[in-house]
Amino acid sequence: MKSNTKTKSGTEPLRFVKVGDTSLAVIPESEKKNPPAAVGAVIMAAMIALSLIAGPARWLIPERSRVSKAFYDGSKVSDGVSINDDLVRLSDSAYNMAALAEQTLGDGGNVGEVKRLAYELNEDGTISAKFADYTELKYASSRLYSEISEQTGLSETQSRLIKQCYSDIQSRALTIENNEYNGLAEKYNGRLTRFPASIAGWLFGLKEAELFK
C-alpha cells in the first residue's frame, strides 16, 4: 500500500500513477502552491528589469515628441518660432525674388535654380533633406541677387522689392542657424544611447532625432 505521509523534511513523497505500461510521477500539492526559489528569483529579476525599462520610457516618448515639435512648431507649443516655419518663409522670399528677377533675366540660370530649390525645400519631408535644400538655396539666392543687382534696367520698385526679399532670406537664415533645435536633438540622442534608456528605446522603436545639419 502506498504511503501519503510527509517526509521528515516536511515535503510530500512522490506518488506514481500507472498509465498503460508507464509510471508517471504526480507533483505534490505543496510543490504546486510553493514554487521553487529559483522560479521566484526569475520572476523578481523580470520585475526589476521591467521597472528599469519603464522609468526611461516614461520620459523618452514625451521627450522625442518635444524634439519633433521643436522643429515643426517651435520649442514652445505652437509659438511659430521654429526652423520649419522659417524655412517656409525663406523659400517664399527666395521664390518671389526669382519671380521678380525673371522679368529681366528670363527663367533660366540662377532664376530657374532658385525656383526649383524653393519648391523642393517645401516638398521634402525629412529634416536632413530640408537642410540640404536650404544650404543650396542660400547660395543660389546669393548668386541670383549678385546677378540681378548688376542689371541697369530695373525699375525702382523692382530693385526695392528684390532687396526686401534678399534681406528676408538673410534674416531667416540667421534665425535658423541660432535656433535651439539641434541642441535639444543632441541632448535627446545622448540620453537615448545610454543604458537603460537604450533598451527602452529599442523596445518602443524610438530612433535618434535627425539633426538639421
Image (cartoon, rainbow, N blue to C red):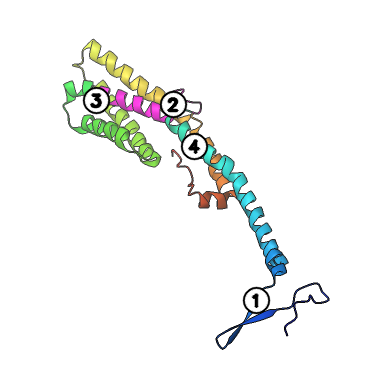
Return the residue nearer the eye: 144 or 37: 37
Return the residue nearer the eye: 171 or 37: 37
| Front position among marks 2 and 4 | 4
Relative to 162, say whether 187 is above or below. Answer: below
In the image: residue 93, left or right of residue 38: left
* SS of the residue under disc 2: helix
| Front position among marks 1 and 3 | 1
Query: Magenta segment range?
Result: 75-98
Q: For residue 78: magenta?
A: yes
- Which residue corresponds to mark 2? 174
- Which residue corresponds to mark 1? 26
Asked if the residue under mark 2 is in contact with the one under mark 1, i.e. CB atoms within 8 Å, the reply is no
- Which residue corresponds to mark 4? 65
Mark 2 packing: few (<14 Cα in 10 Å), some, or many (20+)?
A: few
User: Which quadrant, please, contains the C terminus?
Assistant: top left
View extreme (bottom): residue = 21
In the image: residue 169, left or right of residue 210: left
Q: Position of residue 208 (x, y in %)?
A: 49, 46
